Amino acid sequence: IGITGNFDDAQTGVKKMFSDKELNEYLASKGYQFSSANSINIGRLVPQMVYYVYAYTRLVANGEIKAGDKINVVVPTGNFGNILAAYYASIMGLPINKFICASNENKVLYDFFRTGTYDRKREFILTTSPSMDILISSNLERLIYRIAGGDAKKCAELMQSLTAGGEYTITEDMKAQLADFYGNYCTEDETAKTIAEIFKDSHYVIDTHTAVAAGVYDKYVKDTNDTTPTVIASTASPYKFTR
């Protein structure tokens, strides 16, 4: 099925299909049900949790850290699924110090972590890291549910505010629970320069999304002087992005 629009339009359409009771009853009568391969489906996060644990064990095995030492993780994200998987892994016991959320010029998540207000009322920018061209980060709702103390009603009210008015603001108490998160973003120029610099330094080609993460990590170190061993989640083959 082809649609006209961007990722947010597509994901919103899928969610409407999922919540259409009449359509789902019809499908059930034929022996079918809808599912999703993207991170609308929390099952997508399970294997993502695993590879943070795997990365940690490789650091221990290689002698770069000792078991129990904390690490940082940097994740390029638009829909907030991959970084939420790291957060869930930490709840299960993986020692993570900071969750570094890397955005491209669609920097709605950066603004949220800085201000406590999620505001999708802005220009949608087409970038060279298209998997992050998102203004409605579905999985952030799951984090909001956690910091709202598991209050589904409070979480639903905030999401309804986002749908109706295009924004919501969390309380100061909720914002205080995000102390382990750091957000920043890279411009298109910064992303391109990061790819070039890493190739010049190490003869290793990274894709545009991974470059956003690497660029944001450099900003994080300059902002904090934090030298905790860090895992950067590499996202895709660079050869998917021919330009």
Image: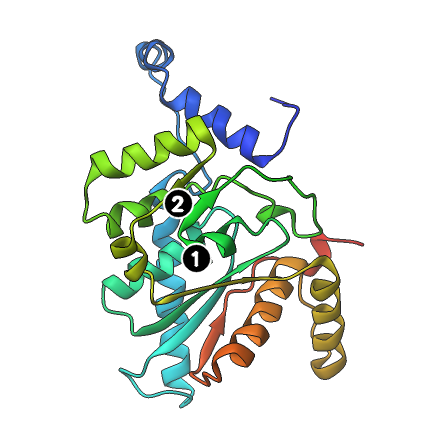
Cα distance in 3D space between marks 2 and 1: 14 Å
Who is closer to the viewer here, 76 or 109? 109
Residue 204, numbered circle: none
Residue at image location 43% in from the left, 87% down from the top: 62
Examine the image and state in which quarter residue 216 appears. bottom right
Q: Is residue 161 above or below residue 170?
A: above
Who is closer to the viewer here, 214 or 124? 124
The quadrant the N terminus occupies is top right
Who is closer to the viewer here, 63 or 125? 125
Examine the image and state in which quarter residue 26 appears. top left
Residue extending furthest toward the bottom = 63
Q: Closer to us: mark 2 or mark 1?
A: 1
Q: Which residue is mark 1?
A: 113
Residue 47 horizontal side relative to residue 13, left or right: left
The spot of residue 99 in percent (x, y) is: 40, 66
Q: Is residue 237 visible?
A: no
Residue 93 horizontal side relative to residue 200, left or right: left
Callout 1 environment at 10 Å: few (<14), some (14 to 19), or many (20+)? some
Residue extending furthest toward the right = 243
Q: Which residue is mark 2?
A: 139
The spot of residue 172 in percent (x, y) is: 29, 55
Residue at image location 27% in from the left, 39% down from the top: 155
The spot of residue 133 in percent (x, y) is: 61, 45
| Amino acid type, callout 2 | Asn
Q: Earlier in the sequence, mark 2 or mark 1?
A: 1
Looking at the rendered structure, the secondary structure element under dot 1 is helix
Callout 2 environment at 10 Å: few (<14), some (14 to 19), or many (20+)? many
The answer to whether the residues at label 2 and label 1 have Cβ atoms under 8 Å apart is no
| Amino acid type, callout 1 | Phe
Q: Is residue 228 above or below residue 76?
A: below
Residue at image location 43% in from the left, 26% down from the top: 164
